[in-house]
Amino acid sequence: MSNDILVRRAESNDADAIAQFNIAMAWETEQKRLDPPTITRGVRAVMENAEYGFYLVATCNDEIAGSLLVTFEWSDWRCGLFWWIQSLYVRPEFRRRGVLKTLHEFLAVEAARQGHVCGIRLYVERSNAIAQSAYAALGMQKTGYEIYETLL
């Protein structure tokens, strides 16, 4: 059995799998239950509106092994876009097989090719030491920023 990992932009027929990944990730990392119809509409909205972002999927043996969402933040300080990694999930049976690394490398190459992307960022739960270790292994660095929000 081949362990080749391929990365591609997600297509509309990937939406249900990505929605299921988001549900699993929210429960696994925060014990939050997401509403399946809402998350499915949210995933499809990204796929129908390029200004919201885009999804990447990693496949192994023709199975979707993982996915991530990229959203955009304009930086006037840098006159460029930050690409934010969100909704990152790798199926448990594919973890520690290079899926995250392959997704990140693909994204970094694509960001550099675009020419107007000034960085790649993500946020992580403070208590998720496993994820933080994985991101550090990719060469990502912890920033000095805290996140505040107002939910509407």
Image (cartoon, helix red, strand yellow):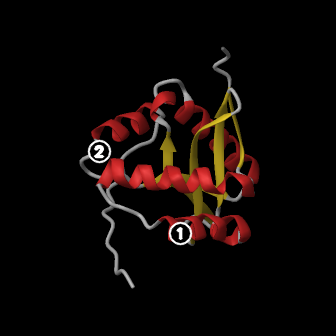
Residue highlighted by disc 1? 37
**Amino acid, disc 2:** Asn
Q: Quadrant of the N terminus?
A: top right
76 to 8, vertically: above or below: below
Residue that appears at 49% across and 64% down: 36
Residue 38 image position (x, y, % from top left): 51, 71
Q: Quadrant of the C terminus?
A: bottom left
Residue 7 image position (x, y, % from top left): 69, 38
Label 1 sits on a secondary structure element that is helix
Q: Sequence-wise, which precedes: disc 1 or disc 2? A: 1
Give the Cα distance between marks 1 and 2.
27 Å
Label 2 sits on a secondary structure element that is loop
The foreground one among 32 and 151 is: 32
The foreground one among 113 and 152 is: 152
Residue highlighted by disc 2? 128
**Amino acid, disc 1:** Pro
The foreground one among 90 and 37 is: 37
Residue 67 image position (x, y, % from top left): 58, 46
